[in-house]
Image (cartoon, rainbow, N blue to C red):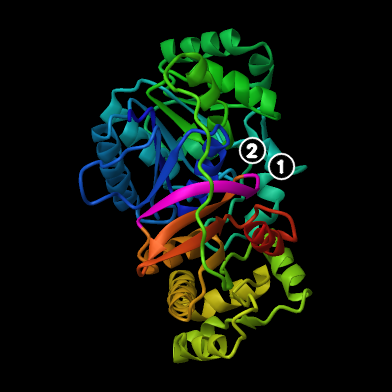
Amino acid sequence: MTTVLGAIADDFTGATDLAGLLARSGVRVSLRMGVPEGPPADPAPFEVIALKIRTAPVDDAVAEARAALDWLRRAGAERFFWKYCSTFDSTPEGNIGPVAEALMRDLGAEQTIYCPAFPENGRSIFMGTLFVGEQPLGESPMKDHPLTPMRDSNLMRLLAPQVTQPVGLANRLTVARGARALTARLAELRAEGVAHVVVDAVANEDLQIIAEACRDMPLMTGGSAVAMPLPGLWQADGLLSQAEAESPPEVGPGAVVLSGSCSAMTNAQVAAYRATGAPALQLDPLELADRGAAPAIDWLREVPAEAAPLIYATADPASVRATQERLGAARAGAIVEEALAACAIAARDMGRRRFVVAGGESSGAVTQALGVTRLDVGREIAPGVPWCFAESGGKRIALTLKSGNFGAESFFTDALDMLDR
């Protein structure tokens, strides 16, 4: 089967977000966890490769993204998508811009767009400014992100230091005039030597226009939502046939919720799930540094098989800062990821087959620890957060990998209820 789109995501939750939106079309989506070691086998029309490079050193991030691009090209893909967070999570050095430029060079692309808007989840761009709900990005809870604090809301200012070529804007007034107007604006900027174009979007209608104008670009970049209209457009173009999604496979009982995200929404989700009376254990990074994950695993063994326990390191910004001051940001994060990964392995070995994971870095650590290399993408629990199915340790498991700010406060309960249904 021909691969129409090859996508690269900078973390595991972002990859499942993109895969879930593409799967709405009914077309088969294959999600690979890391760059596959072997040659392309059984490629799907949509191939998504999940990397763990959002906060990696720039050179490492670029190298991994280029390796993923090479694999996708060998799979037959001719159009490509570089997916990053809808809150443009990055540092002044990258990795959004450097990866985009490297992919552009490899593909011979003169220009690409940047559109992290996701209106269904409250992410919109107006005059180059990214909003989270009604707040500019730099005034939202993202300003306190433990790894990528976002203190500026202007995407052009954020992107410019990360790239070597000029940055421009196609604003909402242009987008509102339709795909032809946007195509003309992009051509105008290209003639001026502008290689990196931020594109405004405040509603799903804008995303449709952007996709119409850019669907033949060698490389598009953005959040997952701007890719959502592409399947329908390519079906109309005759590049894709209509297909029905397969029924989800059966998985065994037993569940565990693992949360490492410290976003405002995940804090609310943890509180809501604890209020249901589910068994819950909060991890203390300082204790983990001394004793490791063994006490948490011992606690998990005592939880009844029919319960769905919550193990979490989610905390408020002040607590996160205090821990980072003691351990350092990188070590504090790594300690939590290692502990959640160890708990995931233990849960699987105890017979639990359903995993709800919150947080991009945590999702990457858990998925890698479980030895998952490929996921079949199922139905969404919330916009951009699907259930996925995989093999781990010779057993069929279900995984949902939730970006920190996604989902309603009841997300953990919603996820488990959907799988039961």
SS of the residue under disc 1? loop
- Residue 62 marker: none
Identity, as a three-letter code, of the amino acid under mark 2:
Phe
| 3D distance between C-alphas at marks 2 and 1 | 6 Å
Residue 302, horizontal then vertical, whole percent:
58, 91
Residue 414, horizontal then vertical, whole percent:
70, 59
Furthest-left residue in view? 38
376 inside magenta stretch: yes
Is residue 168 visible in this depiction of the protein?
no
Q: Main secondary structure of the magenta part?
A: strand
Is residue 54 visible in this depiction of the protein?
yes
Reading the image, the residue beneath label 2 is 118
Residue 135, horizontal then vertical, whole percent:
75, 45
Quadrant placement of the C terminus: bottom right
Q: Give the quarter of the image for residue 71.
A: top left
Reading the image, the residue beneath label 1 is 122
Quadrant placement of the N terminus: top left
Q: Mark 2 Cα within 10 Å, few/some/many (few <14, many 20+)?
A: many
SS of the residue under disc 2? loop
- Above or below residue 240? Residue 380 is below
- Which residues are the magenta region? 373-383
Q: Give the quarter of the image for residue 73.
A: top left
Residue nearest the observer in this picture, 236 or 181: 236
Q: Mark 1 Cα within 10 Å, few/some/many (few <14, many 20+)?
A: some
- Above or below residue 81? Residue 279 is below
Residue 5, horizontal then vertical, whole percent:
40, 30
Residue nearest the observer in this picture, 409 or 314: 409
Report the side of 400 relative to 187 (left or right). right
Q: Are marks 2 and 1 in contact (CB under 8 Å)?
A: yes
Identity, as a three-letter code, of the amino acid under mark 1:
Gly
